[in-house]
Structures are given as structure tokens and as C-alpha cells.
Image: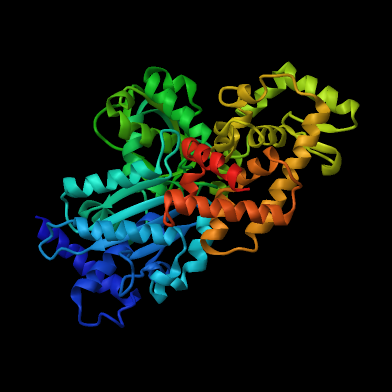
Amino acid sequence: MSIILSNRVKNHIESIVKEHLFLDDAKSDEAKLLSRGLAAICLAGLAGMPYTQVAKYIVDGARDNGIDGVLYDSLRNKLYIVQAKWSTKGTSTIDTGDLRKFIAGVYDLLNEDWSKFNKRVQAVGDEISQGIRNDPEIVLVAAYNSDNSISPDCQAIVKEFLDENNSDSQEVVAFRPFDLKRLLRTIKTVKSGAKSDVDVNLLQWGEQKEPYYAIYGKVSCADVAEWHATHEDLLFSENIRNSLSESDINAQIETALLRSPAEFWYLNNGITAIADDVVRKPIGLGDQKESAYWKVGNLKIVNGAQTTGSIAKAYSKNPKAVKRAYVQVKVISLEHAPIDIANRITTATNTQNRVEAKDFLALDPRQDGIAESMKKLGIQYCYRRGERVTDIARGLDVQELAMALAVSSDSMASVTIAKRNAGSLTDPNAYYPKLFDKPLEASSGWELVRKWRAASAAVSGLSATLEGREAQLAVHGNRFIENVLLTTRGAITPARVAKIHAALKALVDEIHGTDCYLAVLFKNTKKCEALRARISQEI
């Protein structure tokens, strides 16, 4: 069966994809054509882009360093790096040699060593560099026209790469096989005009018939996970944002679902979606409200992207638990609704005030005390929702104070948390209690924030003058360098920042090599502690 299905992919590449590919160096090489076609289908599916736009990101050819496609998706802050391999028999995946070469090329790409790449990679180099500066989620993808899994040896290589670059607290890199099933699903999506049609089983459902049609009810979280597995980010194309790969909110949703699946429906706000049409399937259930099946055309989630993404991630970890959970879903049909209703719903459901972890600081008497002390000095201190600093020269907010306390700490754990998850610094259920565990004198707090501002500006100023890996070191290592500036003697000057940067680069190259991924390094507490001990001697 694989060869029959592979021929469908081949026909699609030859009839639809081929005209968009660069083939000047492969006019009579069918294997190259088909491999590049796989890369194009893969990137089109992952990024939700047409082949005309994807074409320039297909970089397969001489000196591609094992990388066949690379694309930075700015909307989702994801960097997709693809290796594609066509199998004539439709049974092979990727081999260990190609995979090791691919991973070595990934490191060169992340370090912006463009001299090791061909002109097609270099042509999108600036775009990729800008993406790397944004500390994106790195997604390595193996695309192949087989329904087999990659070999155990290849799985071991992938695991080694993931373990080296991820930690228990944050997933920086991911690996996705893009197999025959996903290729066919993507091709179907492209041919159908990229629609996300789903079947919805509603429990305890209801209808709203006027002024336009909508349905609502409980849906199994396992079903929501299946929607995501089938359609992925296509579900969110009408939303103001996609599911965020890493956030405090996502982590909390996922934890709540895995720990207390039976209570999830009570604890979650639910999902709001729009659809081209909503039709009840005639399966003889009559008018009873306990359960009903609906055929929903082109479902788009306009509020609840984080809930959906978290459900999908939880399902991948513990399907049994997620199958016990339900979530409230509302689906509004656009079939007879006003032409602007989709935009109105999206705007309305995403602009309601939400209670964030930071909002609970308004109940903390420590924050009241800091505000009162700052006020006596003529300093405005903002820690409540809606407050804004009117004059930066005489004011600060709680996030700045928390950042300054973390970055100036003797604890490298605080410094890496400030880099890895700045939001947790003002979360009462996360790192906040550790930063504000002692009384803070207003004058010293204000002076500390001013010094941190100066240090941050100095490091940013240096990074703007650099390129390639040196610029990455200043961007990803900014909190580390700020810590050195704030905890050692000396004025905060461009010359001193440059000296620390140069010493840090030499140490990183010596200890971790010239190809380590810096975004990961400066979120690792133990590695940063070792660097911090050495750099004190160097400067």
C-alpha cells in the first residue's frame, strides 16, 4: 500500500509542486526533484503557506550542510529546519549518516556560520538570523514518503540532541517526523483550500438559533487533541495568535488537566470557534440533549488556542488521563451571519480582561509597603493592573524591580530564571516569593533598577554593533553579562561591556565549543555557574 500512496505524493509533486521549485542543478535528477518536493509540502503544511512562498526556503543542493529546507515562521516564533528523503520503494526513512550530518548543519545554522552553506541558504540568512535573535522554538523535521518509524539508532541520535538542548523546565528544540500519513494529509489540505473540517460529538448540548446559528456543549478533550493532531495550526488561522509553545498559562492548563482531569471542565473557560457551516448528523438520536453529532465545516478556534495546544500536549504525555476530561465548546456558524461577524467575534473574545498571576500582587502587603516607601522619595511605583509609569526618570514598575533583583542576585538560578521565564519573577506561585522574601529599602531598590537599566542598555548597544555568533552571545547572554556588570566593581561603560563579552566568548568556546547553541546555554543554571566562576578570574 505504501508504494500506491507514495505515487500519490509523487504525482502531486510533479503536477503541482514542481513548477515552484529551483531545479537548475537537478533537471534530470528525479530523486532531487522528489526530495525537494517533500520539503516543500512539509514547510507548506507546517507554516500554512502556499508553494509559491515556500519555494525560496527549499535550500537542497551542493553545500546544503544536510539541510533541505529552512523557514522562520514569525507569527508562531518557530524555526523549521527540514531534512527530506525520497524513497523509491516507499519504505525507507532517514539513515544515521544523513541524520548526523543534518544535526551538525543545524548547529552551524543556529550559529549563523553562513560560510558553510550554499547561496540559497545565504539568500535567506538575514531572515533566519532575525528569527534566531527572537529565541524561537527550534523544530527539526524529517520528511519521508514512508509510514515506517525512524530506526532505533536514529531515535537515539535524536534523543541525544534533544537532551543536550532541552531541560526539564523548558523545551527549546523539538523533533517531528513528517511521514507519509502527514504528507497525504497536507496534500489533501492544500487541494481542499486549507479547510479544517471536523466531526464534533457534543454532550449536554444546546442551540442558539437567533439571530444566527450556534451550538454549545461539552466535548471530550481527547477529541480536541485529535482536531489538533489532524489540522494543527490551521485551526487558529482566524485567531489573533496561535498556540504558544512555552508559557506560564499553557503549563498551568496542562498541569491542571493531567492532575485533575475530572475537574478540568470546571476550571477552564472553554473554547470559542467559528465555522463555515454547522450541520447535525442524522443518526437517530432524536431531540434528546445528552449527546449529538455535528459535522462542522472549516472549524476555526478564535478563543482558546492555549487551551487547545495544552490539551494536545497533555494528550501526548498521558492519553488515558485526558480521555477523562471535558471542555466547554461554543461553535458559531457563519453560514447566515453578517459578513463581519468573524472579526467581531475574534476581537470580542480576545479583548475581555483576564486575571493574570501578576494581578494578585495587588493583594500583597509587601507591594503596598514598597509603593508607600517609593512615594516618600518622589518615585512612582506601579504594581497594579492598568497603572503606567508617567515619567521613566522618576518611576518604575514591579516587573523592572523583579528583573533587577534577579539579575543582580548572587544566585545564578535567579539569573537564568530571568532569562528563561521572566513572567515567573512576578508570579506569586512561581519565583516571586524568592525575590521578595526580605524587606526592601526603597532607595536601594530604585538605585538598583537604575543600574540595571544602564547595564541592559549597554549590552543592547553592544549587540547592535555585532554580527553572527558574537551578536548571539550578547543577545542570549544579556542577563549573564548584566549580572557580571552589577555584581563586580567598575563603571557600566561600553568598554567594560565589550571586555566582559570578549572574555565570555573565549570561555564559552573553550568549555562548550564553538558550535553550542547559545540560547540553551544561558538558560542552564549549572553551566552558567561554571562560567560565572571562571569569568570573575578573567576580568
Q: Which residue occupies 19% across, 64% down?
A: 86
| Quadrant in which the N terminus is drawn | bottom left
- Left of 291 or right of it: where is 468? right
Q: What residue sits 32% from the left and 77% below the top?
A: 19
Q: Is residue 272 visible?
A: no
**Where's residue 147, x and y in %?**
17, 51
User: Taking 67 as reference, is 528 left or right?
Assistant: right
Q: Quadrant of residue 386?
A: top right
Compare residues 80 and 439 and report the one nearer the observer.
Answer: 439
Q: Is residue 245 above or below residue 86?
A: above
Residue 9 image offset from top left, x and y in percent: 21, 63
| Picture coordinates of residue 162, whole percent (x, y) | 34, 44
Residue 114 visible? The answer is yes
Q: Residue 464 versus residue 409: which sits nearer the camera?
A: 409
Tell me how the rendering is colored: rainbow
Residue 365 x %, y %: 74, 16
Q: Residue furthest front?
A: 537
Question: Quick check: 314 above or below 231?
Answer: above
Count of picture labels: 0
Reply above or below: 160 against 100: above
Left or right of 378? Residue 244 is: left
Q: Quadrant of residue 427?
A: top right
Using the image as rendered, state which of residue 146 and residue 305 is in the foreground: 146
The residue depicted at 23 percent of the width and 60 percent of the height is 98
